[in-house]
Image: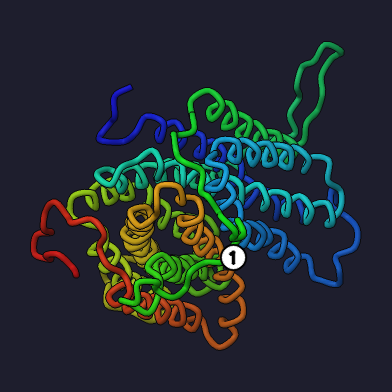
Amino acid sequence: MKRLFGVNPQVLALALARMSESVGNSFLVVVLPLFIATDFVTGATFGLTEVFITGVILSIFGFVNSPLQPFTGRLSDSTGKRKVFVLFGLVLIAAASFAYSLATSYWHLVGLRVLQGVAGAFIIPTTVALVNDLATEDNRGGNMGTYNTFRLVGFGVGPIAAGGVVAAGPYSVPVAAGTVTITGFDAAFYFAAATATLAFFLVVFLIRDPDIEPKADDDESVLDGIAIRDPSGENLLDPVFALGVVSFFMAVGIAVFATLGDIVNTRLDQGPEMFGLQFAAFVLAQILLQAPIGRATDFYGRKAFIVVGTVLLVPTTFVQGIIPDATLLSGVMSDSWLMFLARFLQGVAGAMVFAPALALAGDLAPANESGSTLSVLTMAFGFGVAVGPLLSGFLVAWGFAVPFAFAAALAAVGVGIVLTQIDEVVTPKRAIPFVGYVT
């Protein structure tokens, strides 16, 4: 098969599979809070309020899968296999999604989210490692950007469609004995299971493991630790660890917005639909820009984009906390659209950081260690997404601007880390106009 714009056909197939799985998995972000609020779920709440336990159930996915990712990534390196890990994770995702239709208590939901978190630990690092194995240093950025674009399309489409599927229920389904009534919630859970099943068959028939030599662990544990100090002694931090820290800071800055819906809507005098649009603005920017930015890094280098992206994260994160207090553009657009613009520009910054960071980590990874190397970044991002909402819920007690100011300060620290701890690995083919080569 021919490459499309330098993208490996198997990467496109893998991207389609992750898009399908992401549609169903992101369904649950919208469906589970609605499901918990109904009479379908009963039983002990462990002494927690319903709102708090909803947040816990949603966050469990990130807190379970993130620390497990280096383990599964390293295990896939030691076996020289990626595909079987992806397939196993998809089976778990499909089974758990279907099982939500049978859940009746909070314990069931917690257990199923833990199971999905384990599934994510098998899928996330091994799919990224597969992309890295299938790419070369000449097209790694474009392949990473394309993969992330498709994945984010699924993540963005899922929540939009989920509410409609639930609201349109119940459904009457004809069967041999007559008709069966399916609630809107059950339909959503079945749909999530079906998308994971579709992803499973896409991987089965379209993906093959590249020829990589299994990592010989000698006497070391397969699950040994992550390098923090730079083994070469040239910098303080290991470059992959440094990229992971920057990815964590970026994810925290993105996620602090998520739990402040009611406060944002009150401050900006807007409805929940506008908040949803503002939340999606980040994803929209990522969808539009990840592939072209990733491709550009193949020619102009990775570090310059990461530097510009982390610098841009600082103001675009901070300004969200001072709207509508910031009135410079109040005569040009409404406060709600100012927030949308800030979120979109934050998405632009994120697109300039994440795909180039994955590509740079791929450049640094030995041929048989993609799983363990790239899992550092995927783990860090997952932790950031899980920590951000909890952090904002705590810091907002000191003022609406405080969570955003704190996240912006983390991004500023990230700028310093990129400038001092990360070096380009592959010499850029061209210099960036008006920017030059960042050393």
Where's the C terminus, which quadrant? bottom left
At label 1, the amino acid type is: Ala
Instruction: Tell me where residue 425 sits by quadrant.
Output: bottom left
Viewer-proximal residue among 63 and 211: 211
Residue that mark 1 sits on: 386
Towards the viewer: 435 or 425: 425
Residue found at x 30% / y 70%:
312
**Residue 263 horizontal/vertical position (percent):** 56, 73
The quarter of the displayed image where residue 246 is located: bottom left
Q: Residue at x 46, y 51 (%)?
A: 369
Say above or below: 164 vs 280.
Answer: above
Other residues around mark 1 within 10 Å, as few (<14) / some (14–19) / many (≥20):
many
Residue in the picture at 58% in, 76% down: 391
Total numbered badges shown on the rendered structure: 1
The percent coordinates of residue 81 (x first, y second) are 54, 39
Question: As drawn, which residue projects farthest toward the bottom?
Answer: 398
355 relative to 20 in the view: left or right: left
- In this orientation, which residue lies closer to the viewer: 139 or 324? 139
Position of residue 435 in the picture relative to residue 213 (left or right): left
| Residue 314 image offset from top left, x and y in percent | 34, 75
Q: Residue furthest front?
A: 219
Residue at position x 71%, y 39% in the image: 189
Q: Position of residue 131 (x, y in %)?
A: 42, 42
Instruction: Judge whether residue 190 can be spotted in this image.
Output: yes
Q: Secondary structure at mark 1?
A: helix
